[in-house]
């Protein structure tokens, strides 16, 4: 694959606009009754109308057989090799609750847990305390003072929280404190790289102070930390391609992932229609739009074939609003497959539709897994979609003379 | 491609079973009479029955245009990049005659040759002496005593033999003794890497002793050695994926290649039916099975289209025995193509059929080169089949959160 440096060298200014419409987990599997996948079962007249002028294909987010999490799945769509750019769990959890990270922030994912009088873990999840209790305890922990460190402690859900350590010299490379077994003592944080020594010291100070602060609490009288990570150093889309990029997403994690690559978040309401309205409102101000539809994935994970079909149909109904804006390139795909039959993210390649006036039309009849297999994009890696989108938007000059 | 380290980190335990059925050299080319390939000409009702529920594709063992030997071809199928993991000729020859190699063994491929009174080579193959003579001379050479070295010398066929030097400090990086030309003296073994100095010394001692031991023989009065190599350091399938893996193969080389990656050899008779019987007998004891059918390749090399077709049909007739065992994943493919028309291994991509309950069905009608081209696996590398098999067997967790 071409390197980001080489790609950036090819970028040229243009007045064109690109919309990347992501139906999270859109790829499916056949249902037993009639052998149709979610996309095949959905009535999608507007998508179907696009197909004869579009180029279709299948994309592997990471590689054959590899099931992506949401982080790597989206990094791929944004044009970054997910194996080269890795997002730590702490960072992902932090962006998932809309925390904005700076270069000085070290994030960790926390669990409240229960320990006995000797400090041995009796419950790694502190009986899954209610989120309200978690919030109160986080406020308590945020009062901890560590010299030279600005501390942020925020609840996620139940026993889970995020802690951000902000300060100079905090580097990655820390072991986690969760021994993954009850009856054991929490582990001290160890620096696995020499440059992480300061961060290990700070993390251990925090854990000690947290234990003191929680001493009289029950059942959540201790914390376990893991996934220590910093905001990855990723070149921004603006720097690579010269695009002003916007994200329209209901869930904070996807906005956070998009901010990571330099997108600006555009306010939108909670419904699919709200997201299309936000696109209309922002269309003049940006030239790259990442629109994220979450519920195709949620219903896939629930195993709810029918409702996943309904979300696809809902997007299709709103699609004319997007088409009336006449983007130069419209790329419709998913970050991975979440077949309702499988009830989880899966490794199955993701259908892709690219529409532009420069498409070589396919013989495909519809936007579906089976038809995409025959498409002109072939079977590619998700990270190759971004150069394709830029090319079809005439934003890349030729390589070499 | 994802690294083996990353893959191993994704492995998770499962109760599922995988069968990798390799028809050696199965890929073919059309015959003149009707334009059908070997797979297309074969009557394969059971394979055909699998197709509607399977995912098909084409695989390149190494890369477009590269014809693999049996070693790299199989390493690819086992999930190892054949360009990164190389097996020396000495080792391949040794496993080909069922020798078991330890970490201390340095293997070399030997030729008996003829030299004149001045030691100049007059025949690099000693007139292709009969295998029986070769065996007698090997027994003679095995009596050589080298301090600190355990010596194994075994016949292969005609003038060819294998020598194993076992001892501490024997490292790879030796030049060969065959000058590839008559009228020249055999070359001394040189250490091409400093750590190979001890091995070079031992090899030269052996050659000198062999010349003495063979002095009164005719025409085989000298040896030439090449392909000095050690057992490659390859992570085992058990360590990578947590599978207990078995090999069912008639030819020792394939058992040896499989042992190299941690498979256990299961006893089987010589016929295709015997191999299926061995699978039935061992099915409860392992969760990964590599079954190797040799004769598709042999008949391909002979240019015997009809008999290659018959072997494919024979496998198809036995297939129901395998299907009754209900493996969770069945992967049917070859290690390379050996078109009868070409009479040799070739670079043509190899047809692949993957059957599992999680397959997105293709439109393909049969298991053939032409139909596989339309399949959902697309056109991939053979080494990507192993992650796919593991994914379909639900033995990989997702990458990233």
Image (cartoon, coloured by chain):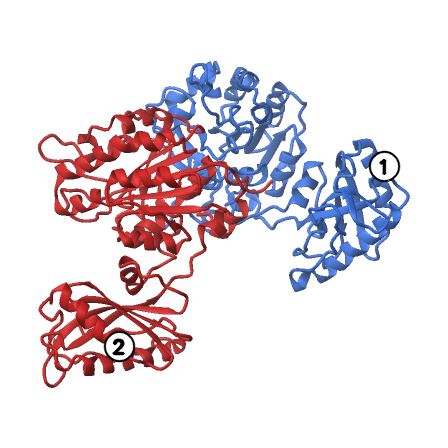
Chain colours: A blue, B red
Assess disc 2: are there few (<14), some (14-19) or many (≥20) residues with their C-alpha within 10 Å of its C-alpha. few
The front one of A44 and A20 is A44
Assess disc 1: are there few (<14), some (14-19) or many (≥20) residues with their C-alpha within 10 Å of its C-alpha. few
Q: Position of residue A379 (x, y in %)?
A: 39, 35
> Could one spot residue B151 in this view of the protein?
yes
Q: Residue drawn 39% across and 78% down?
A: B194
Q: Which mark is residue A136?
A: 1
Q: Residue drawn 12% across and 86% down?
A: B118
Q: What residue is disc 2 on?
A: B143
Q: Position of residue A175 (x, y in %)?
A: 68, 54
Q: Position of residue A361 (x, y in %)?
A: 34, 26
State the SS at label 2: loop
Q: Which mark is residue B299?
A: none
Q: Is residue B30 left or right of residue B321?
A: left
> Could one spot residue B374 in this view of the protein?
no
Q: CA distance from mark 1 to mark 2?
A: 82 Å
In the picture as drawn, the residue positioned furthest to the right comes out as: A216
């Amino acid at each position: 694959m071409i390197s980001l440096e080489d790609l950036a060298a090819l970028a040229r200014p243009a007045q064109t606009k690109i919309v990347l419409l992501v139906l999270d987990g859109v790829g499916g599997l056949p249902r037993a009754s009639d052998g149709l996948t979610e996309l095949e079962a959905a009535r999608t007249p507007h998508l179907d109308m696009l197909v004869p002028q579009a180029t279709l294909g299948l994309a592997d987010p990471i590689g054959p057989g590899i099931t992506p999490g949401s982080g790597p799945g989206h990094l791929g769509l944004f044009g970054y090799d997910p194996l080269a750019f890795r997002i730590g769990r702490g960072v992902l959890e932090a962006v998932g609750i809309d925390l904005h990270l700076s270069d000085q922030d070290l994030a960790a994912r926390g669990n409240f847990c229960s320990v006995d009088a000797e400090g041995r873990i009796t419950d790694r999840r502190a009986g899954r305390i209610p989120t309200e209790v978690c919030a109160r305890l986080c406020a308590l922990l945020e009062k901890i003072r560590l010299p030279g460190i600005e501390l942020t402690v925020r609840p996620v859900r139940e026993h889970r929280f995020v802690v951000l350590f902000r300060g100079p010299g905090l580097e990655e490379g820390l072991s986690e404190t969760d021994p993954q077994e009850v009856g054991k003592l929490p582990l001290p944080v160890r620096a696995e790289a020499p440059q992480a020594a300061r961060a290990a010291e700070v993390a251990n100070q925090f854990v000690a102070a947290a234990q003191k602060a929680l001493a009289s609490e029950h059942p959540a009288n201790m914390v376990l930390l893991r996934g220590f990570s910093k905001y990855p150093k990723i070149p921004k889309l603006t720097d690579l391609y010269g695009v002003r990029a916007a994200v329209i997403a209901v869930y904070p994690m996807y906005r956070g992932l998009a901010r990571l690559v330099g997108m600006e978040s555009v306010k939108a309401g909670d419904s699919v229609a709200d997201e299309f309205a936000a696109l209309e409102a922002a269309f003049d101000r940006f030239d790259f739009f990442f629109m994220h539809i979450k519920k195709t994935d949620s219903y896939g994970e629930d195993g709810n074939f029918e409702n996943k079909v309904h979300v696809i149909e809902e997007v299709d109904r709103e699609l004319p609003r997007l088409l009336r804006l006449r983007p130069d390139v419209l790329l419709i795909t998913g970050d991975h497959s979440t077949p309702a039959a499988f009830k989880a993210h899966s490794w199955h390649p993701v259908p892709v539709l690219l529409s532009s006036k420069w498409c070589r039309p396919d013989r495909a009849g519809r936007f579906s897994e089976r038809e995409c297999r025959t498409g002109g994009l072939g079977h590619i890696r998700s990270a190759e979609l971004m150069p394709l989108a830029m090319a079809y938007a005439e934003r890349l000059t030729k390589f070499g003379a």
